[in-house]
Image: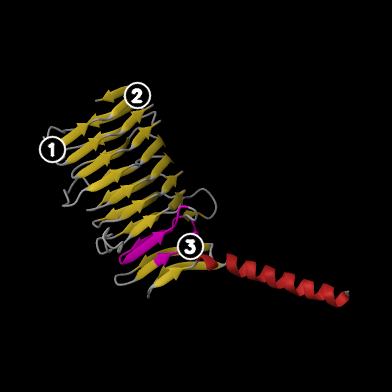
Amino acid sequence: MLNLFKKYSILLSLLLLCNVLKAQSIIGGVFFSDTTLLLANSPYRVSSNVLVPIGVTVKIEPGVVLNFDANINFQVEGVLQARGTVTDSIVFKLRTGNIKWEGFVFTNTAIPYNPLDSSGCSFDYCLFNKAKDCIWILGTGIAIHHSEMSDCESGIMAYGSGISIQYTKIHDFAFIAITTHYPVILPLPVKIDHCEIYNGGGNIDYIRLTGNAELTNSCIHDCPTGYSLSVWNGPNIKVANNNFYNNNFAILLLNSSDSTVEITNNNFSNNNTNLA
């Protein structure tokens, strides 16, 4: 009996050691070579700023959890592919406390998403929580599909060309959910399709479209202050087949006399003002 007890004690100690080691998967700094963040090593603690440099690809397996320390960002100059599944989302969240992590930044050298072969930078079935700004895109094209952002200050700063945001929820945020880059009209549109934006806070415009952008087949609701959507100068803005309900102002037009600004076939219900 004593020997059996010792064997079980050793086995239990080994299992506890494995759990401790697993809990201490720590990343930070520069990825100098192609890397895959494995589910077997999850969860990961992101303890310092991360850089994916030009020429390097980082992939994240379905089900992986990244716990960020406060004020930490993840910058991509090469390729990041975070592709979960409908049953195994990838999670990006604050490790502890109330000071948010900084979010992802994609520079203009990051490889854009190519829908023909699914190469380039993309998020699919990802969950973002308690980030300052979930994703900044600075001059490239990223795909963000089947994802959810909650309890963040802002969602997506879509300052790029050929950005695809589909089947994604952004809710319980403090400032802007999605904004496009108004100083520059880039060649390919930002496409926002089949998304849901709700429970925004602050006296601000929650979605801001400027030029070469489309908002279609989406639902924007329960934004009690500010403007659920502002449409700026254009050109080439399309707002079609959306549902706006339980908002303060549904749509605000700002200097949007350009004939290529199209607002058609939208449904409005229980907004204080539908169009301003």
For marks 2 and 3 on the same chain, the one whose residue lies earlier in the sequence: 3
Q: Label 3 neighbourhood size at 10 Å, few (<14), some (14-19), many (20+)?
A: many
Secondary structure beneath label 3: strand
Q: Residue at x 26, y 46 (%)?
A: 191
Q: Label 2 neighbourhood size at 10 Å, few (<14), some (14-19), many (20+)?
A: some
Secondary structure beneath label 2: strand
Q: In which quarter of the image is the C terminus?
A: top left
For marks 3 and 1 on the same chain, the one whose residue lies earlier in the sequence: 3
Residue 207 in which image quadrant: top left
Does residue 166 appear left or right of residue 9 in this picture?
A: left
Question: Mark 2 — residue?
Answer: 269
Looking at the rendered structure, the number of numbered marks drawn on it comes to 3
Q: Which mark is residue 260?
A: 1
Instruction: Tell whether position 104 is magenta.
Output: no
Numbered range of the magenta stretch: 59-86
- Is the residue under label 3 in contact with that under label 2 (CB below 8 Å)? no
| Of 71 and 88, the residue lying toward us | 88
| Of 24 and 87, the residue lying toward us | 87
Give the residue type at disc 2.
Ser
Secondary structure beneath label 1: loop
Q: How far apart are marks 1 and 2 (CA)?
A: 26 Å
